[in-house]
Image (spheres, rainbow, N blue to C red):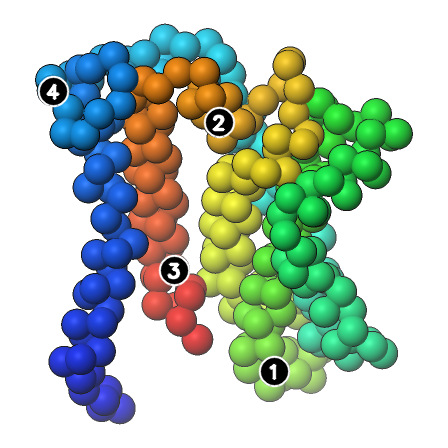
């Protein structure tokens, strides 16, 4: 099937949008290699000392590993909960499935600061503030809507006759699910995992409400660092986070392909 030609005006508009989105990198990347003691653009001297300062800062490294472990746990739980929920909504045709789907998406409609305040009021009496378990639960409030939505879309786009054919040939429902449905959903599972990981790792507002002196995530540690100091370390961390995001995108591309994963 021939693709429709893209108009020059659309190409120019897309190029301008890319430039607009990537423009901050033109400032952040040079600042991250600054040899100055404070943020300035353009830098007066050049050095990689601030990258070394990140790894020499115990607070930042501890916060990184907390964020990494938190993102991994949240991603696994989001898949474990979101997949059955999506299957029930799409395949089982539950009564009120549309209402349930909207209910799952409701947290995304609230401003994050309002959601964080509500979570604070609920979790405080339960003793979950400043705990890893509380952070996991708070991040799940944000990642689960994405997981259910993406997995529901992936399920809805699967060819149902293939599953029906497997059932007709004598396969049990669980066998059909694990041997037929899940392999066909690979692109949806990978995209859900990548999205949940990045959303959890970068979440700062909810984490500000949930963290404490003994437990901090990397975005929260960066926020407090910028409040107290104006050195280029925050720019260096930002560049490393951009690199981490690119790594996740490359993994998705090499695993299932970006087109199959995000374009339906």
Please tell me how crowded label 2 is: few (under 14), some (14-19), or many (20+) other residues with Cα within 10 Å: some
What residue did someone put label 1 on?
Answer: 160
Marks 2 and 1: in contact by CB < 8 Å? no
Q: Earlier in the sequence, mark 3 or mark 2?
A: 2
The residue lying at 64 percent from left, 44 percent from top is 113
Please tell me whether residue 194 is drawn above or below residue 204 in the rendered image. Answer: below
Q: CA distance from mark 3 to mark 1?
A: 21 Å
What residue did someone put label 2 on?
Answer: 223
Q: Nearer the viewer, residue 8 or 98?
A: 8
Please tell me whether residue 207 is drawn above or below residue 194 in the rendered image. Answer: above
What x and y, as percent, mark residue 173?
A: 74, 70
Residue found at the very far right of the displayed protein: 125
Q: Earlier in the sequence, mark 4 or mark 3?
A: 4
Q: Earlier in the sequence, mark 1 or mark 4?
A: 4
Marks 3 and 4: in contact by CB < 8 Å? no
Q: Earlier in the sequence, mark 1 or mark 2?
A: 1
Please tell me how crowded label 3 is: few (under 14), some (14-19), or many (20+) other residues with Cα within 10 Å: some
Q: CA distance from mark 1 to mark 4?
A: 62 Å
Q: CA distance from mark 4 to mark 2?
A: 25 Å
Dot 3 falls on a residue whose secondary structure is loop
**Label drawn at residue 256:** 3
Numbered disc in front, either 1 or 4? 4
Q: Nearer the viewer, residue 162 or 68?
A: 68
Q: Is residue 163 visible?
A: yes
Q: Nearer the viewer, residue 79 or 106?
A: 106
Q: Earlier in the sequence, mark 4 or mark 2?
A: 4
């Amino acid at each position: 099937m021939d693709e429709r030609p893209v108009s020059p005006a659309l190409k120019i508009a897309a190029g301008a949008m890319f430039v607009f989105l990537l423009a901050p990198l033109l400032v952040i990347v040079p600042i991250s290699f600054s040899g100055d003691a404070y943020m300035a653009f353009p830098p007066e001297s050049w050095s990689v000392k601030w990258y070394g300062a990140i790894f020499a800062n115990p607070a930042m490294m501890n916060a990184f590993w907390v964020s990494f472990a938190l993102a991994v746990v949240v991603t696994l739980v989001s898949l474990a909960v979101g997949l059955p929920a999506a299957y029930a909504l799409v395949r089982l045709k539950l009564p009120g499935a549309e209402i349930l789907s909207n209910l799952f998406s409701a947290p995304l409609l609230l401003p994050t600061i309002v959601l964080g305040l509500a979570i604070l009021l609920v979790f405080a009496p339960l003793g979950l503030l400043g705990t890893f378990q509380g952070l996991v639960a708070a991040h799940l409030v944000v990642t689960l809507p994405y997981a259910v939505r993406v997995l529901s879309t992936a399920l809805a786009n699967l060819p149902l006759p293939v599953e029906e054919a497997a059932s007709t040939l004598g396969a049990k429902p669980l066998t059909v699910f694990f041997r037929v449905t899940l392999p066909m959903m690979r692109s949806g599972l990978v995209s859900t995992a990548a999205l949940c990981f990045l959303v959890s790792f970068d979440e700062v507002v909810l984490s500000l409400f949930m963290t404490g002196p003994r437990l901090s995530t990397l975005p929260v540690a960066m926020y407090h660092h910028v409040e107290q100091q104006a050195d280029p370390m925050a720019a260096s961390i930002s560049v490393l986070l951009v690199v981490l995001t690119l790594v996740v995108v490359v993994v998705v591309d090499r695993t299932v392909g970006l087109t199959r994963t995000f374009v339906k």
